[in-house]
């Protein structure tokens, strides 16, 4: 099953449903795309009265028939998280002043507030936090979307907000302990993305005017360059 959503040629996130129906961004709203890659329909539309600018970072909430997503605005208003029903298109506000949602299999919600990443217990069916949000990581880098990725099991890969200086790439558990990946050399690193099984990390390295895509196989401690001809 393939699900794509692009705005200005840049993917803005994709959710995938168990029945082969996903939600990806199309234009500025969310687009529902069936598993054959052909049929599609609008899932959300911008509310001009609220000066909404984009709906992005969609993620299916398992067993609920709902998609969690981020709403950003074209003014100074803080982003917020909402959920949309796949069957009716009805939207519900989930959390104010929050962005970059990641729902974890153990029933926690990771989200960004400012440059800090927070985690809280979350009832996916009632769309409510079950306890206070506590910080996991401070100073997450932003260049468009936040420079982080989280597996459903709770493994987190991120880049700190440290400017164009030498960085390392690693993971941090919910206990806040950072573990650098073996085989990744320090550099100017961008856009880490974790594979579904949590065993590989794709990321960009900036070297002068050139940007190179690399993949780190965590279990082997090996990193390789991705060729444009790779499948």
Image (cartoon, rainbow, N blue to C red):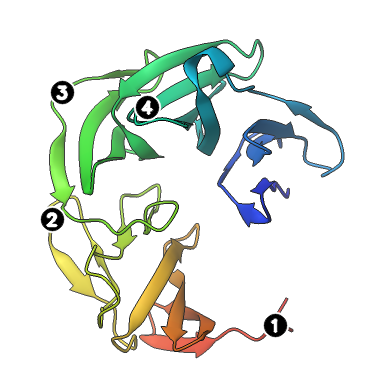
Instruction: Name the residue carrying label 4.
Output: 80
Which comes before the other along the chain, label 4 or label 3? 4
The kind of secondary structure element at disc 3 is: loop
Q: For mark 1, does the 10 Å Cα neighbourhood hold few (<14), some (14 to 19), or many (20 or more) residues?
A: few
Q: Whole-Å distance between the Cαs marked 4 and 3?
A: 18 Å
The kind of secondary structure element at disc 4 is: strand
Report the side of 95 relative to 83 (left or right). Answer: left
- Whether residue 123 appears in this view of the structure is yes
Which comes before the other along the chain, label 4 or label 1? 4
Which comes before the other along the chain, label 1 or label 2? 2
Q: Whole-Å distance between the Cαs marked 3 and 2?
A: 18 Å
Instruction: Name the residue carrying label 3.
Output: 131
Residue 202 image position (x, y, % from top left): 48, 71
Q: Which mark is residue 95?
A: none
- Whether residue 218 appears in this view of the structure is no
Instruction: Name the residue carrying label 1.
Output: 228
The kind of secondary structure element at disc 2 is: loop
Residue at 78%, 41% in the rendered image: 35
Q: Are marks 2 and 4 in contact (CB under 8 Å)?
A: no
Residue 193 image position (x, y, % from top left): 46, 63
Q: Whole-Å distance between the Cαs marked 2 and 4?
A: 24 Å
Residue at 74%, 84% in the rendered image: 229
Residue 183 image position (x, y, % from top left): 34, 88
Q: Are marks 3 and 1 in contact (CB under 8 Å)?
A: no
Residue at 48%, 16% in the rendered image: 50
Q: Are marks 4 and 1 in contact (CB under 8 Å)?
A: no
Residue at 40%, 53% in the rendered image: 151
Residue 90 position (above or below residue 156): above
Report the side of 88 relative to 73 (left or right). Answer: right
- Of discs 3 and 1, which sits in the foreground? 1
Which comes before the other along the chain, label 2 or label 4? 4
Q: Nearer the viewer, residue 156 or 167?
A: 167
């Amino acid at each position: 099953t393939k699900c794509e959503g692009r705005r200005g040629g840049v993917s803005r996130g994709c959710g995938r449903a168990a029945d082969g129906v996903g939600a990806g961004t199309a234009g500025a709203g969310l687009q529902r795309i069936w598993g054959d890659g052909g049929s599609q329909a609008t899932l959300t539309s911008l509310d001009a009265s609220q000066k909404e600018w984009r709906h992005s970072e969609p993620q299916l909430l398992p067993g609920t028939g709902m998609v969690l997503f981020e709403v950003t605005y074209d003014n100074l208003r803080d982003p917020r998280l909402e959920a949309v029903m796949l069957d009716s298109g009805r939207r519900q506000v989930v959390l104010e002043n929050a962005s970059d949602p990641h729902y974890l299999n153990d029933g926690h919600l990771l989200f960004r507030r400012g440059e800090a990443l927070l985690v809280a217990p979350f009832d996916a069916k009632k769309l409510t936090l079950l306890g206070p949000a506590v910080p996991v990581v401070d100073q997450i880098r932003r260049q468009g979307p936040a420079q982080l990725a989280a597996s459903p099991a709770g493994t987190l890969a991120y880049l700190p907000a440290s400017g164009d200086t030498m960085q390392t790439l690693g993971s941090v558990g919910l206990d806040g302990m950072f573990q650098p990946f073996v085989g990744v050399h320090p550099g100017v690193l961008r856009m880490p993305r974790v594979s579904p099984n949590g065993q590989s990390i794709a990321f960009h390295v900036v070297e002068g005017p050139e940007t190179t895509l690399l993949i780190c196989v965590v279990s082997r401690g090996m990193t390789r360059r991705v060729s444009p001809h790779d499948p």
